[in-house]
C-alpha cells in the first residue's frame, strides 16, 4: 500500500491520474449519445481517422494533438453528412473511413520518415509520459465535453430519440447532430493519450453498456456511465501501476479490461432485472367478455405472500401457478 | 392548466393555398387548398399513398412545398418560429434507441419548445408533463421504460409528448394505425378532452373508428388531390369511388405508393424514408 502511495507521489503518476480521472468521466458521456444513435463504432472510426492526423502532425512538426483534432473533426463531419443522406448504410461509410484513416496514417508516417514507434504512442496511449501541457489540455477538453453533454442533455436526447418531432419542436436538428459528431471527435483526441486511439472507443461504449444493465432512464444511464468510466480509468491506472513492479502493463489496456470486467459483473444482474420486470408486466386488459370459467375445487387461499406470483390484470390481480391465471371472484376463483 | 383556447385574434391555425409537394421528382400532393379554423377537429382521410400524411408533414415544414403557400397562425411557414404552438404526433413511435429512456423523459421532450438552453425543468414544467400523462391515462407509468409499453400505450405517450408543449394546434399522423380497440378508445378520450379545451386538431386517419363522433369536418384526399371537404363521412363513404370525382377510372391491383424508386446503392436512403 505504501508502495502505491509512493508511486502516486511521483509527478508523472499524478499527471496520469488527473488525465485518467477527467477523460474517464467525459468520454462515456459522449459515448452515451453515440450508443443512443446506434453508432457505437463511430468512436473507433474517428480514432482511425485521427491516426492520419497524428502522422501529419509528426511529419510536419506541428503539434500532433491539434492535427489529430482537426482530422477527427473532419472525419466526424464526413460521417455525419453520410449518415444524414443515407441512414441505414452508414456502417459501410464508417468502414471506408476506418481503413482510409489507418492506412493514411501509416503511409504518411512512412513517407515522412517517421518511425512507427512514435505513432504507437498514440495508437496504444502513453498516459505515463503525458506532459503538464497535455494534462491541462485534456482536463480542459474533458470539462467542456461533460458540461455540454449534461447541460444540453434534453436537446441531444430529443434529437436522437425522434428527429422529426425535435424539428417540429423548433430544435435545429442538423446543428445538434453535428455537435454530437464534433463532441465525439474531440473526445477521441482527448482520450488519445490515456487509452490510445485504437482503444478509445471501448472507453466510450463499454461503460454505457454496463450502465444500461441497471437503468431504465436515459439520464441515469448518462450519469452512471460517467461514474463507471471514471472508476474504470482510475482503477485501470492503479492496476497498471501495481503491476509495474513485476511487468510492463500498458495503462490503456488495463483501463479497457477493467471496464469490461465491470460489464461482465453487471450483466447477470441486468439479465435478472429484465427477467423480473417481464414477469411483473401486467396482462393485457382486454374488454370483459362473457366467458366465465370458475375454477372447480380450490383448497388453496390466494393472497399476499401466498407463494404464487401476483400479476396486475386490469383492476385486479391474477395469481399464477401451474400454468393457470386465477383471479378471485366472490368466494371462488376464475380462470383468466 | 393545459387549457390554451385560441381566440380568433390568434389567426387561422392552418391555411394551405394551392400547395404542392414533390418527393424524389414525383408530385405527391397537387394543388391542395385547406383552411382549418381555430377550435375545429378535422379528419384528413384517404387511402394509403393518397398524400394525406405528406400534406400534414408539409404543414409542419418537414416536407418543403414545391408550389403554393402554407401559413400557420397567419405566419408563412418559412418565417414561423412559434413552434410551441404546434403539437406534432408522428406516425411511428420514434426509431428504436440504443439507450433506455423512461416514459417521463419522452413525454418531457415535448416541453423543449418552451425551455431555454442549460436550464433544468421548473416545477411548472414538471406539473405540465404530469398533467399531460394524466390526460392520456399514463399516470403512474412515468418511470417505466418506453420500450416496455404496448404499441397503443406508446402512441398515447407520443400524444402526451405533444401535449407537454401546451400547443394550440395538434397535428396527428395516423395515431390509430396498428392500435387495438381499447387503446383507440383511450386515444379518443384523450382527443375529446383536448377538443373540449379548445385545441384545434388535424387528425390523419385511414379509418376513424371510435374517433368518428369527435369529428367536425372531413377532408378526403385521393391521388394527391383534395377531393372532398365537408361534413364528416362514414368510413366506407371515404373509399367509395365516385366521391368528388366527375368520372371514375378503376385501377386494379395494389395501390402502391408510386413515388418511391427502389434503391439499393450503399449511400442512398432506404425506402421507408421517402414518405
Image (cartoon, rainbow, N blue to C red):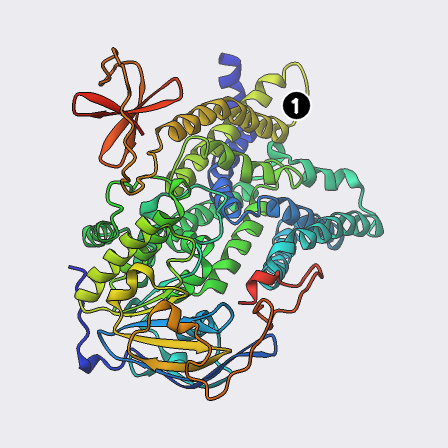
Mark 1: which secondary structure? loop
Vertical placement of B41 versus B249: above or below? above
Label 1 neighbourhood size at 10 Å, few (<14), some (14-19), many (20+)? some
Would residue A162 be seen by someone viewing this image from the given angle?
yes
- Identify the residue position indicated by label 1 in the image: A249
x and y percent of residue B68 in the render?
45, 87
Specify the quadrant that holds the C terminus of chain A.
top left
Horizontal side of A154 relative to B2 (left or right) equals right
Look at the image and tell me whether residue B60 can be seen.
Answer: no
Query: What residue is rendered at 52% in x and 17% in y?
Result: A4
x and y, in percent, of residue A107 in the image: 81, 50
Q: Position of residue A92 (x, y in %)?
A: 69, 52
Indicate the position of residue B197 as horizontal and vertical percent values: 17, 65
Q: Residue furthest top?
A: A299
Closer-to-camera residue (B132/A101)? B132
Front-most of residues B159 and A250? B159
Q: Which of B120 and B274 lies nearest the eye of the viewer?
A: B274
Q: How many marks?
A: 1
Query: Which of the chains bears the disc numbered 1?
Result: A
* Residue sitting at x 38%, y 73%: B237
Q: Is residue A86 left or right of residue A209?
A: right
Residue A196 position by quadrant: top right
The residue sitting at 21% across, 66% down in the picture is B195
Q: Is residue A267 above or below residue A149?
A: above
Question: Would you say B105 lies left or right of A149 here?
Answer: left
Amino acid at each position: 500500500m505504501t508502495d502505491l502511495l509512493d508511486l502516486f507521489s511521483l509527478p508523472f503518476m499524478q499527471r496520469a491520474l488527473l488525465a485518467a480521472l477527467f477523460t474517464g468521466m467525459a468520454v462515456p458521456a459522449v459515448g452515451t449519445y453515440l450508443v443512443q444513435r446506434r453508432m457505437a463504432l463511430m468512436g473507433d472510426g474517428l480514432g482511425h481517422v485521427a491516426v492520419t492526423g497524428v502522422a501529419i502532425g509528426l511529419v510536419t512538426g506541428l503539434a500532433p494533438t491539434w492535427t489529430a483534432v482537426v482530422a477527427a473533426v473532419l472525419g466526424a463531419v464526413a460521417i455525419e453528412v453520410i449518415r444524414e443522406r443515407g441512414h441505414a448504410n452508414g456502417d459501410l461509410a464508417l468502414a471506408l473511413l476506418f481503413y482510409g484513416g489507418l492506412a493514411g496514417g501509416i503511409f504518411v508516417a512512412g513517407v515522412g520518415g517517421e518511425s512507427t514507434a512514435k505513432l504507437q504512442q498514440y495508437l496504444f496511449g502513453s498516459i505515463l509520459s503525458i506532459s503538464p501541457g497535455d494534462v491541462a489540455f485534456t482536463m480542459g477538453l474533458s470539462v467542456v465535453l461533460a458540461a455540454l453533454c449534461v447541460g444540453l442533455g434534453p436537446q441531444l436526447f430529443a434529437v436522437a430519440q425522434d428527429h422529426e418531432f425535435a424539428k417540429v419542436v423548433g430544435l435545429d436538428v442538423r446543428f445538434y447532430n453535428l455537435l454530437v459528431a464534433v463532441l465525439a471527435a474531440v473526445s477521441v483526441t482527448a482520450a488519445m493519450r490515456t487509452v490510445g486511439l485504437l482503444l478509445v472507443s471501448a472507453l466510450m461504449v463499454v461503460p454505457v453498456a454496463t450502465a444500461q444493465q441497471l437503468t431504465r432512464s436515459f439520464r441515469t444511464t448518462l450519469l452512471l456511465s460517467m461514474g463507471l468510466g471514471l472508476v474504470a480509468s482510475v482503477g485501470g491506472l492503479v492496476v497498471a501501476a501495481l503491476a509495474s513492479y513485476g511487468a510492463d502493463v500498458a495503462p490503456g489496456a488495463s483501463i479497457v479490461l477493467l471496464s469490461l470486467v465491470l460489464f461482465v459483473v453487471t450483466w447477470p444482474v441486468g439479465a435478472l432485472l429484465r427477467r423480473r420486470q417481464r414477469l411483473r408486466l401486467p396482462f393485457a386488459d382486454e374488454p370483459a367478455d362473457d366467458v366465465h370459467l370458475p375454477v372447480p375445487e380450490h383448497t388453496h387461499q390466494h393472497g399476499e405472500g401466498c407463494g404464487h406470483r401476483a400479476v396486475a390484470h386490469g383492476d385486479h390481480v391474477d395469481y399464477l401457478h401451474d400454468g393457470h391465471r386465477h383471479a378471485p371472484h366472490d368466494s371462488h376463483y376464475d380462470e383468466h | 392548466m393545459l387549457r390554451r383556447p385560441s381566440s380568433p385574434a390568434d389567426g387561422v391555425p392552418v391555411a394551405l393555398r394551392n400547395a404542392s409537394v414533390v418527393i424524389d421528382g414525383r408530385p405527391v400532393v397537387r394543388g391542395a387548398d385547406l383552411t382549418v379554423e381555430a377550435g375545429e377537429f378535422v379528419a384528413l382521410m384517404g387511402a394509403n399513398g393518397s398524400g394525406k400524411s405528406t400534406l400534414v408533414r408539409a404543414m409542419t415544414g418537414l416536407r418543403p412545398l414545391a408550389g403554393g403557400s402554407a401559413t400557420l397562425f397567419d405566419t408563412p411557414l418559412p418565417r414561423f418560429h412559434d413552434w410551441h404552438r404546434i403539437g406534432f404526433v408522428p406516425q411511428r413511435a420514434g426509431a428504436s434507441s440504443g439507450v433506455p429512456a423512461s416514459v417521463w423523459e419522452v413525454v418531457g421532450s415535448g416541453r423543449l419548445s418552451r425551455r431555454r438552453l442549460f436550464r433544468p425543468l421548473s416545477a411548472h414544467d414538471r406539473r405540465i408533463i404530469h398533467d399531460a400523462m394524466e390526460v392520456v391515462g399514463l399516470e403512474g407509468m412515468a418511470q417505466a421504460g418506453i420500450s416496455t409499453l404496448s404499441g397503443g400505450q406508446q402512441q398515447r405517450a407520443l400524444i402526451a409528448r405533444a401535449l407537454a408543449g401546451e400547443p394550440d394546434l395538434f397535428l396527428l399522423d395516423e395515431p390509430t394505425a396498428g392500435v387495438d380497440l381499447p387503446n383507440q378508445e383511450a386515444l379518443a378520450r384523450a382527443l375529446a378532452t383536448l377538443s373540449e379545451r379548445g385545441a384545434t386538431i388535424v387528425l390523419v386517419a385511414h379509418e376513424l373508428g371510435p374517433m368518428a363522433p369527435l369529428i367536425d369536418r372531413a377532408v378526403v384526399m385521393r391521388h394527391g388531390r383534395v377531393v372532398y371537404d365537408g361534413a364528416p363521412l362514414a368510413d366506407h363513404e371515404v373509399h367509395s369511388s365516385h366521391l368528388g370525382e366527375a368520372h371514375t377510372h378503376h385501377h386494379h391491383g395494389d395501390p402502391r405508393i408510386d413515388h418511391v424508386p427502389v434503391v439499393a446503392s450503399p449511400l442512398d436512403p432506404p425506402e421507408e424514408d421517402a414518405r
